[in-house]
Image (spheres, rainbow, N blue to C red):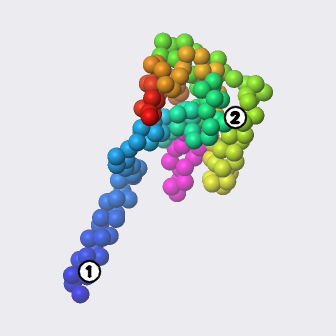
């Protein structure tokens, strides 16, 4: 009986340590180039009391839809989420503003207005927004920005820089999945 209590106590202690170590992340085991690229185009910046910023570059190299690939080669699509710890453990969602996107030499990319976007891209963004609202009971906010790709290409040497909230988040290209067999 005493051994059982010790085992339960140890299990509870391990579980408590795991829960306290948030956020939990694991590395991929034997990742493929596609998996490495998918991981690379997502940035999570834990800013302590300033919250957490999550930036995703929706690149043609990580989207499985053949219909979206040519659109994502023509445009740079970025999503940003900025949350802060709220009372009771629920996050609060910041309104993301002031995003600027440049290439590696500091040249600003030309932002695309909603009325100039292809319908498929508008649908992708609308679906994502609806999913976010539904999964967060209407509290979640996600910023979507679309720019003309210009010199940015997922499979050519270069750099994409997303400037937000005093930080310059960068993505070096080519992505690992480029040139795969």
Residue 77 seen in the figure? yes
* Name of the residue lying farthest toward the left: 3
Left or right relative to 15: residue 95 = right
- Gap in angstroms between the C-alphas marked 1 and 2: 56 Å
Residue located 50% across and 48% down the image? 85
Kindly state the secondary structure of the residue where label 2 is placed: helix
* Of pointers 1 and 2, the one earlier in the residue sequence: 1
Label placed on residue 168: none
Q: Are marks 1 and 2 in contact (CB under 8 Å)?
A: no
Give yes or no for residue 45 being in the magenta stretch.
no
Q: Which residues are magenta?
A: 80-98
The quadrant the N terminus occupies is bottom left
Q: Nearer the viewer, residue 90 or 99?
A: 99
Q: Nearer the viewer, residue 124 or 141?
A: 124
Q: Give the quarter of the image for residue 13.
A: bottom left
Number of numbered labels in the structure image: 2
Horizontal and vertical percent for residue 62? 53, 37
* Name of the residue lying farthest toward the bottom: 1
Left or right relative to 91: residue 127 = right
Residue located 40% across and 42% down the image? 32
Q: Nearer the viewer, residue 160 or 98?
A: 160
The residue to which callout 2 is attached is: 121
- Residue 135, above or below 59: below
Residue 47 seen in the figure? no
Left or right relative to 47: residue 8 = left
Q: Residues within 10 Å of mark 2 (few under 14, many from 20)?
A: some
The residue to which callout 1 is attached is: 5
* Name of the residue lying farthest toward the front: 181
Q: Residues within 10 Å of mark 1 (few under 14, many from 20)?
A: few
- Residue 116, above or below 105: below
Horizontal and vertical percent for residue 137? 66, 55
Q: Give the quarter of the image for residue 47.
A: top left
């Amino acid at each position: 009986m005493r051994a059982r209590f010790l085992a339960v106590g140890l299990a509870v202690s391990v579980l408590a340590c795991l829960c306290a170590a948030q956020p939990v992340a694991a590395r991929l085991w034997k990742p493929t180039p596609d998996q490495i690229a998918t991981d690379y185009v997502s940035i999570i910046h834990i800013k302590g009391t300033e919250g957490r910023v999550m930036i995703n570059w929706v690149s043609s190299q990580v989207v499985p839809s053949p219909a979206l690939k040519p659109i994502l080669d023509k445009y740079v699509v970025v999503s940003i989420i900025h949350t802060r710890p709220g009372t009771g453990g629920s996050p609060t969602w910041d309104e993301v503003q002031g995003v600027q996107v440049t290439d590696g030499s500091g040249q600003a990319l030309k932002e695309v207005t909603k009325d100039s976007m292809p319908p498929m891209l508008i649908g992708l963004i609308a679906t994502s927004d609806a999913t976010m609202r539904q999964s967060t009971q209407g509290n979640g906010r996600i910023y979507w920005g679309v720019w003309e790709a210009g010199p940015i290409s997922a499979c050519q040497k270069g750099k994409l820089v997303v400037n937000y909230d005093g930080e310059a988040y960068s993505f070096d290209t080519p992505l690992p999945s480029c040139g795969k067999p």
